[in-house]
Image: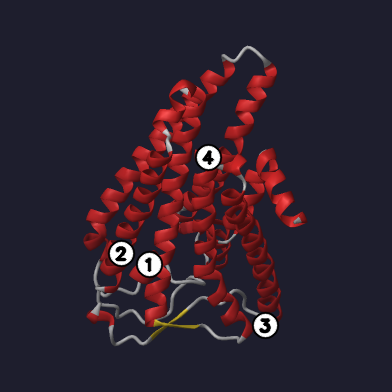
Amino acid sequence: MSNSSSISHFLLLPLADTRQLQLLLLWLFLGISLAALLGNGLIISAVPSDHHLHTPMHFFLLNLSLTDLGSICTTVPKAMHNSLWNTRTISYIGCVAQVFFFMFFVTSEFSLLTIMCYDRYVAICKPLHYGTLLGSRACAHMAAAAWASACLYALLHTDNTFSLPLCQGNALGQFFCEIPHTLKLSCSNPYLRELGLIVVCTCVVFCSFVFIVFSYVQIFRAVLRIPSEQGQHKAFSTCLPHLAVLSLFLSTAAFADLKPPSISSPSLDLALSVLYSVVPPALNPLIYSLRNQELKDAMRKMMNA
């Protein structure tokens, strides 16, 4: 990272052009952050304390809540601080930390959502093997693999990004430090150096996406073969929250990355980045708790205690 050591700080994109709108968005970010902290905090507290929630699905949900908390705490506090004090700066080390932790938590979330898809597939398509395939040790190993691979992936991307010479100024077109906007400051073509990581990332994402699609095709076929309507409803109710969270995560991130340059603008990029980095951590607990009676009961007991 010595090639970029001459840069002491970066300039982030302000949330708005006017002071009044900046303060309005500050309150909006504060509300979303509090909702994310409350919802994910309740899940993190409820799952270990209630024995009814000691299941693989809730164990992975607890891990997902941890990633959501980490993700929103990585990006939002600095944006709120800059809006409050009407500044744009972030230190070089702070930017490196933001890139690493954001990549780490986003990659962890995608890995956990893929694992949760496997959990639903086994629960519905192979219920007799559920205890064997998803025992406590297997769940711990899968969660550890998700966290470890995300850490390695984020470390490689962060090191590769900040080891490039940056000579196109220090202004980022994003309200937090993100790899694509940092690479735009590079003196050379950064994507040639990133090619290996991009190929690996694309292969992993494609394979995971194919696995998710295949799993849900099998799940829906199995559910439709259930003779009773009540059984179908119960099976669907365990899958729909995961499918909704997965769709929200993938659709916003994919559109932000794959949208054509002709429709790109700072305001649109800002809105999309808020959709995939700030909104999901607040919505995920709500989506999962709406159709999960056991989780709602555990949360209610905690709040009434």
Label 3, label 4: how far apart the Cα atoms are: 45 Å
Q: Classify residue 153 as left or right of residue 258.
A: left
Q: Which is more N-terminal, label 1 or label 4?
A: 4
Say how many tags the image has. 4
What's the mark number on residue 51?
Answer: none
What amino acid does circle 3 point to?
Answer: Arg
User: In the structure shown, which secondary structural element does the residue marked by tag 2 occupy?
Assistant: helix
Q: Which is more N-terminal, label 4 or label 3?
A: 3
Circle 3 is placed at which residue position? 19
The reply to whether dot 2 and dot 1 touch (C-beta < 8 Å) is: yes
What amino acid does circle 4 point to?
Answer: Met
The reply to whether dot 3 and dot 4 touch (C-beta < 8 Å) is: no
Circle 2 is placed at which residue position? 155
Residue shown at the point (23%, 81%) measured from the top left: 2
From the image, state whether disc 4 or disc 1 is nearer to you: 4
Label 1, label 3: how far apart the Cα atoms are: 30 Å
User: In the structure shown, which secondary structural element does the residue marked by tag 1 occupy?
Assistant: helix
Q: Which is more N-terminal, label 1 or label 2?
A: 1
Label 2, label 4: how far apart the Cα atoms are: 28 Å
User: Where's residue 162, x and y in %?
Assistant: 29, 73
Circle 4 is placed at which residue position? 57
Check disc 1: other Cα within 10 Å, few if <14, some if 14-19, many if 20+.
many
Residue shown at the point (52%, 19%) measured from the top left: 221
